[in-house]
Every structure is written in structure tokens, then in C-alpha cells.
Image (cartoon, grey):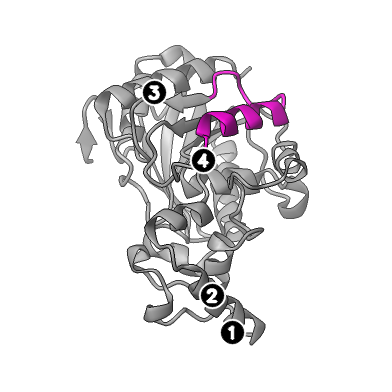
């Protein structure tokens, strides 16, 4: 069994017979609670190192009783381009149902980047009849649409091309390479391109230009505590976007958004600095103490 530090890295592999979901557990396999980590675009198990720091902190806090699960779902790695949030909810719910079946009490979903969109989508319980969870953590919730203004100013013509494909009944087909975005480095369907980059697309949860009614509608779906942690120096956030104001807006939109929410100091999107990882892990521990 592979290991890193004081805990097994692949301690308790799980694979759903019904879907493409699998998960790997870090920490105490006898823990009564579970923290389920959901990565962003092109992520999968073991691609976001800071979650190991969080797992180590949890092992040192046995009274909380949490282990960490990293998931591989249909949208993991290059699968994101031909998947969608609805499939993610189905896959995550299959894991949650399994964890309940083996006796896990509290289950928290921890989303990074596009994993935050998954957490937002997961709150549509009436739509999906998915297995409820006991809380959420959102780290680096950013707008894919707004991020393109920084990295690819001429991206709008590519969205027009994707929308024409959808109108022609070819939404499930992948965009030609010249109409896609090189930095994605994966095949992407017209439908998924629209979801990610169109205003009002399925993934458009965190854009700064969303009106107040829309924001309140999104965050008003939460009925369990949620911790929202932006990265102070997130490279995918344009300089024109005020993350402090966004974080406060989300707190004002729902009483379930924890007052522990805020900005992770001095770090970018994936929290590469060790000091920032320690800060993040500490804040996660504080939040989990509030889950009753």
C-alpha cells in the first residue's frame, strides 16, 4: 500500500459498480465522518497536493473523526470536456450513498475550482434526488468566463462557434482544435464549452456580474453550513474583480455561509505555498468544529 507521511495514501479504495466513480481514502479508515474532495478541471486523485496537508491536520485532530476521500469521477482528468455538472452530481451522490452504507455519519463536500461548481449544483436536491450531505467547503470559486478575459481576449468568437454547433444539433460533438482553447489541452464538446464560458451557462455560478437576485437564488439553496475560501492572489481572477466583496456578498446571501469564510492570504489558485496550505488546513479544522 502506497503511503506518504503518517497515513496511508491509498488506504481504502472504493469503486462504484454502477458508475465510473472511485475514491481513495487518506487518514483513519475507522473515522466516523468523511471529507470528500472534488478537484477542478483536469484534476483527479492526487493532483491537488494541499488536500494532503488538510488530511494530516485531521489525523492530528482525532476528536473530529474525519478522514479524506479523493474522487475520480467521469469528468476527472480529460473527461471534463465531454461531461457536465449533472453527471458530476450523480457520481458524487453514488459515493455519498456508499459512505452512508458503511456507517459514515457526517459527510462534507470540499470543492476546489470547478469542484466548487459541483458543490453548488449538488444543492439541487429536488432536481437530482441525490444523497444529502452535512456541509460544504468551496476553495477558489472563480468564474471561467471572466478568467478568459485575462488569458484569451478573443475567446468570444469561439463561443459563437460552439453555440452554432448547438443550434445545429451538434452540441455533443467536440469542437475543432482551432475553435477550442489550447490551454484546456483536451477534447471539449460544444455543450461543455457553452456551460463553462457562456453567461448563464450551467457552470456560471461565480461571475462578478451576476445580478443580486441570481446570487441570492444560488446561495439560498444551501441548508447546511458552507465555508467559502477565495485565494487572495488567484491568477484566474481578473484585476477588476474584487474577491473580498464577492466573499462578503456570498455571506450576505445566505445565513449558512460561515463567517469563517474569507481569502487565503498570499496564495494563488491551487495554494502552492506551504504557509498558505497550513492556513487553509487550520481554517478547515475551525469550520469542521462548527458542524454539529
Query: Which element carries disc 2, helix, strand or loop?
Result: helix
Q: Residues within 10 Å of mark 4 (few under 14, many from 20)?
A: few
Residue annotated with mark 2 = 190
Magenta stretch: residue 259 in it? Answer: yes
Corner quadrant of residue 273: top left
Q: CA distance from mark 4 to mark 2?
A: 27 Å
Residue that appears at 33% across and 31% down: 267
The kind of secondary structure element at disc 3 is: helix
Q: Is residue 273 above or below residue 155?
A: above
Q: CA distance from mark 1 to mark 4?
A: 34 Å
Mark 2 or 3 closer to N-term?
Answer: 2
Q: Are marks 1 and 3 in contact (CB under 8 Å)?
A: no
Q: Report if residue 144 is visible in the image.
A: yes
User: Which of pointers 3 and 4 lies earlier in the amino acid sequence?
Assistant: 4
Disc 1 versus disc 3: nearer the observer: 1
What residue did someone put label 4 on?
Answer: 241
Residue at mark 1 to residue at mark 2: CA–CA distance: 8 Å
Q: Nearer the viewer, mark 3 or mark 4?
A: 4
Amino acid at each position: 500500500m502506497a503511503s506518504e507521511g503518517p497515513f496511508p495514501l491509498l488506504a481504502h479504495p472504493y469503486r462504484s459498480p454502477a458508475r465510473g466513480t472511485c475514491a481513495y481514502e487518506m487518514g483513519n479508515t475507522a473515522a466516523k465522518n468523511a471529507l470528500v474532495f472534488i478537484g477542478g478541471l483536469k484534476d483527479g486523485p492526487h493532483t491537488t497536493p494541499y488536500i494532503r496537508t488538510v488530511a494530516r491536520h485531521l489525523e492530528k485532530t482525532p476528536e473530529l473523526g474525519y478522514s479524506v476521500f479523493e474522487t475520480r469521477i467521469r469528468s476527472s482528468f480529460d473527461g471534463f470536456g465531454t461531461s457536465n455538472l449533472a453527471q458530476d452530481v450523480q457520481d458524487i451522490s453514488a459515493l455519498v450513498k456508499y459512505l452512508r452504507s458503511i456507517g459514515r455519519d457526517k459527510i462534507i463536500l470540499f470543492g476546489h475550482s470547478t469542484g466548487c461548481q459541483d458543490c453548488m449544483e449538488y444543492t439541487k436536491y429536488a432536481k437530482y434526488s441525490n444523497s444529502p450531505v452535512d456541509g460544504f467547503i468551496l476553495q477558489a470559486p472563480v468564474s471561467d468566463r471572466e478568467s478568459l478575459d485575462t488569458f484569451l481576449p478573443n475567446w468570444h468568437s469561439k463561443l459563437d462557434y460552439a453555440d452554432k454547433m448547438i443550434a445545429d444539433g451538434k452540441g455533443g460533438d467536440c469542437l475543432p482544435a482551432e475553435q477550442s482553447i489550447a490551454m484546456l489541452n483536451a477534447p471539449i464538446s460544444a455543450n461543455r464549452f457553452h456551460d463553462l464560458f457562456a453567461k448563464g451557462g450551467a457552470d456560471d455560478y461565480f461571475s462578478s456580474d451576476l445580478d443580486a437576485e441570481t446570487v441570492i437564488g444560488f446561495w439560498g439553496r444551501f441548508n447546511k453550513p458552507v465555508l467559502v475560501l477565495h485565494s487572495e492572489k488567484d491568477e484566474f481572477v481578473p484585476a477588476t474583480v474584487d474577491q473580498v466583496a464577492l466573499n462578503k456578498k456570498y455571506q450576505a446571501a445566505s445565513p449558512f455561509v460561515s463567517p469563517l469564510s474569507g481569502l487565503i492570504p498570499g496564495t494563488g489558485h491551487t495554494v502552492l505555498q506551504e504557509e498558505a496550505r497550513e492556513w487553509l488546513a487550520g481554517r478547515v479544522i475551525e469550520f469542521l468544529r462548527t458542524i454539529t
